Amino acid sequence: MRLIRLGPEPSAVGADVRAALSTWGNGDAVLGGVALLGVRPPDCPRDLDAVIVLPRGVLVVVGVDLPDPAMRLEAPLNGQWKIDGWPLTRPDGATSPAAEALEATTAVARRIQDMRGEPLPVTTVVAVGPYVGQVVQPTVDLNRGVRVLHPKPTTLLAAARELGTSDRPCSAAHAAKLLAVLAPTGSPPERARLIAEGFSDAAADLASASTMLLPKVTPPKPGRRLLPYVAGLIVAVLLIIALILSLSSGDTADSSPSTTPTPQPTTVVVDGRNFAQRGSDRTDDCAPHTFGDVRAWLSTHLCMQLRRAQYETTVDGRKAGVAIAELSLPDATRAGELHALASAPGTGGVSALVQEGKAWPGGPSTFDRSAIRVSVKGALVRITQVVWAEGEQDPADPKLAQVTEQALRLPAAQQ
């Protein structure tokens, strides 16, 4: 278990959670995985003591500080908590602290789904302290994937093993995306370290899977040797019948209207201006298609996807080319960082498709000295460039600037 501390524990019992996790040590000898400590994932309603990303599941750990140590804690999800027979009272009037934990777990699961992370089961651990000798939970709550426990190394380990139930292990590449989606700052561990923590090597998995899927060949029994000949005869009869039917209906086939797929539109209209698409591309490997400081930044930060598109339009009888690049980042914080970097002069950017051998007849050969607009919306950073197809270029040309504004509404990839 690799620990990454991103902030202080929001509860006193969070220190016990961290101590329990640290006893397992790095690597997968005990369990494996990566624990984000003191983290608040984007859109989560509260700080979390830990989010544990395991090869087969994600655990959301929420700490609850009890007023006193307890020998017995009755902890139903939807009922009154009781400490040694006495109702637990809280200043906010809540009878069950588990409701807050479930709300946080729901937010984490929604975040993973919205960012298209690996669909691992997301479950809840409510860590209670300063000390609890015995916790009583209804069976229905246990079946919902919720554990209320005092975070000793053994109890937390048992819960992690019970709740990590995915049918297949998460790969190191998917684990890196999950961690980037959940952590608002920093970068995920390197791939080799994630593999050391028990996340699978996708290449090795594919190799073993292809071997396992090879069908087992058994010699045919004597009684089955005639089956291929019988099957061949049946196929021949069916072909003759199909030929007769096609010949008999040939006269009417020509008169029936043909159904051909409707071609997808290749022109987009914005404010009355036509933009003809001249190619698009998408990739999950963003950095190789960038340059300058932008490339250096992307080499150390996760980028979910890069989408690029090219368009051609006409302004007062003169052709202009448009290049669009849209980078999908894990969250708005990192998108803001990249936006600030890419907006500064001389910091590089994203290579246009024409610079990778995808020019079109009559279009520009380069997007150097283009009018540029860098914008950000949520976790998306968009770089729009416009140049004249021929002639001198002026980045401050007001006509190009107007096209740049209109191009903000163009799709970054063909649907």
Image (spheres, rainbow, N blue to C red):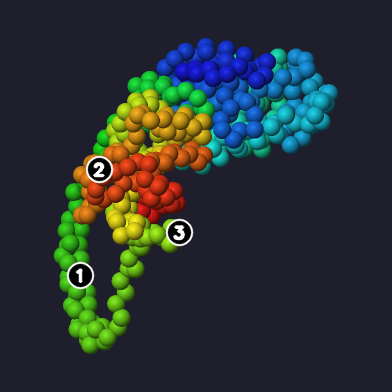
Q: Where residue 53 sits: x, y (%)?
A: 49, 27
Left or right of 291 on screen, residue 156: right
Left or right of 329 on screen, residue 314: left
Q: Is residue 308 above or below residue 232?
A: above
Q: Where residue 245 sits: x, y (%)?
A: 23, 82
Tag 1 or tag 3, which sits nearer the N-term?
Answer: 1
Left or right of 134 on screen, residue 49: left
Residue type highlighted by circle 2: Thr
Residue type highlighted by circle 1: Val
Q: Which residue is mark 3?
A: 271
Residue type highlighted by circle 3: Asp
Please tell me whether mark 2 sits on a helix, a strand or a loop: loop
Q: Residue at x 22, y 74 (%)?
A: 238
Q: Which residue is mark 2?
A: 366
Q: How many neighbours does mark 3 have within 10 angstroms: few (below 14), some (14-19), or many (20 or more)?
A: few
Please tell me whether mark 1 sits on a helix, a strand or a loop: helix
Residue 51: mark in rendering: none
3 or 1: mark nearer the eye: 3
Q: Where residue 404 sits: x, y (%)?
A: 40, 47
Q: 5 or 141, which lies in front? A: 5
Mark 2–mark 1 Cα distance, whole angstroms, equals 58 Å
Regarding residue 291, the answer to whether it shows in the image is: yes
Tag 2 or tag 3, which sits nearer the N-term?
Answer: 3
Q: Quadrant of residue 252?
A: bottom left
Mark 3–mark 1 Cα distance, whole angstroms, equals 59 Å
Tag 1 or tag 2, which sits nearer the N-term?
Answer: 1
Q: Residue at x 75, y 19 (%)?
A: 66
Q: Which residue is mark 1?
A: 235
Q: Residue at x 24, y 84 (%)?
A: 254
2 or 1: mark nearer the eye: 2
Mark 3–mark 2 Cα distance, whole angstroms, equals 26 Å
Q: Quadrant of residue 353?
A: top left
